[in-house]
Amino acid sequence: MAERERLAFELTADERAAAQARHRVVAAARACVRDEGADTLGLLVSEIVTNAVVHGGEGRALEVVASLSERSVRVEVCDDGEGFVPHPRALAPDDVGGWGLFLVEQLASSWGVSFSGRTTVWFELPCLPVARAA
């Protein structure tokens, strides 16, 4: 997969981080994930950044990387959390929290977690094909 563009930035892990990351990543990937794809991308960025704030330590630095190719957009969020092994868990429909990785699992084409001193959660979404004029 040849990379076309790469956006990398740091944020402070606070209540503004999810919105800041969402706006920057969606703006950078707008041509790739148009319309409802942009909504899905924004939701998933918000979810993994929020998890990084909660589990990686508020006030610490988060690193966000979005890599765009002709076929997909990959987003990685790196934090100072202890790392974890993702596992499915049962959620009741009225549960308030705990939906983040469930949504990532359901909506992303692929996703994962890695740990090498810092925790990185990543996901990929396919780019939508450009409509051609008839």
Image (cartoon, grey):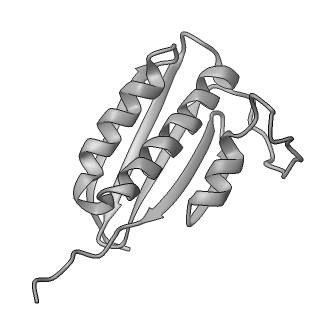
Q: Residue furthest top?
A: 59
Q: Quadrant of the C terminus?
A: bottom left
Figure check: 91 above or below 69: above
Q: Nearer the viewer, residue 45 or 103?
A: 103
Which residue occupies 75% across, 28% down?
96
Q: Residue furthest bottom?
A: 134
Which residue occupies 32% across, 66% down?
69
Q: Quadrant of residue 72?
A: bottom left
Answer with left or right where residue 116 lies relative to residue 87: left
Q: Nearer the viewer, residue 27 or 77?
A: 27
Q: Nearer the viewer, residue 2 or 42?
A: 42
Which residue occupies 54% across, 54% down?
123
Figure check: 76 above or below 111: above
Q: Quadrant of the N terminus?
A: bottom left
Q: Residue furthest left?
A: 133
Q: Nearer the viewer, residue 74 or 119?
A: 74
* Percent x, y of residue 95: 81, 32
Figure check: 48 above or below 122: above
* Percent x, y of residue 131: 20, 78
* Percent x, y of residue 18: 47, 27
Which residue occupies 36% across, 73% down?
71
Q: Residue furthest right?
A: 90
Figure check: 88 above or below 133: above
Please count the marks in the image: 0
Q: Quadrant of residue 132?
A: bottom left
* Percent x, y of residue 17: 45, 22
